[in-house]
Image (cartoon, rainbow, N blue to C red):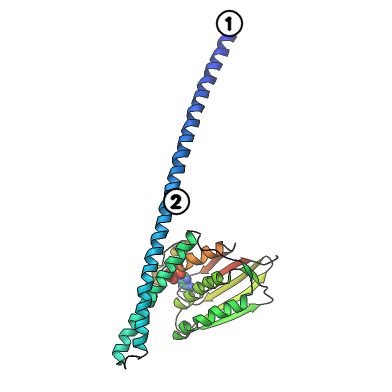
Amino acid sequence: MEAANNEEARLAEMRRLNAELDKSAKLLIRRDLELGRASEKLKQVDKMKSEFVSLVTHQLRTPLSGIKWSLSILLNGDVGPLSPEQRAYLSKTYESNERMIALINDLLQADRLESGIERFTLAPTPLEPLARKVIDDLQPLAMRKKIRIELKTLGEVSPIMADASGLSMVLQNIIDNAIKYSPQGSLVTVTLKETGAKTEIAVEDHGIGIPSEAQPRIFGRFFRARNALLADAVGSGLGLYIAAEILRKHNGDIRFESGENNGTIFTISLPTKDA
Ligand code: ADP
């Protein structure tokens, strides 16, 4: 009699558990559907944001290019000589316009990376000529601050699998920062080296450094450390974000060592070809 009662109680308990499981399963299915719908909506919103950024940036680029063109004509003296004061004001306007163009380009680039529009084609790329070209392009900026950029290759460095223009952009952002955040007359060293499975590019400067409280955030979008803002160096806070995103798509990464007023070393690391 007691055994039959126990059996009945167990069965009742099982039926109750079953019903609960059934309820949970239905709830899960409903949540899954809701999440699916929410994710679809987010994707749509993200697409709209991308389209908006792309539209606005493209629309802004055209008039900015027009302004650049007109200012160049005036600065070249093509429509008559300028007084030193006029030249000084026009040069300042030209620089501000250049900054705006750079910001628009950064915004566009960040959006292209996020939305996956930007596709990279990896091909064997020799590093030394690539680094040399980026350094040459940045020479006018470095010369204005009397900064010397030295390129060193330690031992044999084989070509790596990379998208040359993507990797140039990474290096350009890092060396540009090294110049921007360094004092007049200092040295920036770019070192290439291959160590087994990794090929590394290190960029060392003797500049303002990155304060410890800012270090966890410097790869975030639009982040700029307080000493960078005080240094009066212009920037969008997008350069490192873009660099890290491009490297992620190369299966590479970027790290740094820095201390406030103690200079900075950024090290880009990429897989060695055939390693
Ligand atoms: P920005 O346009 O401000 O240079 P980045 O994304 O390139 O933007 O860099 C983010 C921030 O990281 C900078 O604002 C600065 O605070 C810091 N930083 C980057 N590189 C250096 C460097 N070489 N020396 C000192 N601070 C740096």
Asked whether mark 2 lies closer than 8 Å to ligand 1, one says no
Which amino acid, by three-letter code, is at mark 1?
Met
**Residue 37 image offset from top left, x and y in percent:** 44, 43
For ligand 1, give the image quadrant. Answer: bottom left
In the image: residue 254, left or right of residue 155: left
Residue 227 seen in the current view = no
Mark carried by residue 1? 1
Q: Position of residue 164 (x, y in %)?
A: 58, 72
Q: Residue at x 46, y 32 (%)?
A: 27
Q: Nearer the viewer, mark 2 or mark 1?
A: 2
Q: Tell me the kind of residue under disc 2.
A: Lys
- Do the residues under discs 2 and 1 have CB atoms within 8 angstroms? no
Q: Pointer 2: residues within 10 angstroms few (<14), some, or many (20+)?
A: few
For this rendering, which residue is in front, 27 or 1? 27
Vertical side of 39 occupied by 249: above or below: below
Q: Earlier in the sequence, mark 2 or mark 1?
A: 1
Q: Position of residue 62 (x, y in %)?
A: 37, 73
The disc label shown at residue 257, or none: none
Of the 4 image quadrants, the one containing the N terminus is: top right
What residue does disc 2 label? 43
The quadrant of the rendering that contains the C terminus is: bottom right
SS type, badge 2: helix
Would you say residue 176 is visible in this rendering?
A: yes
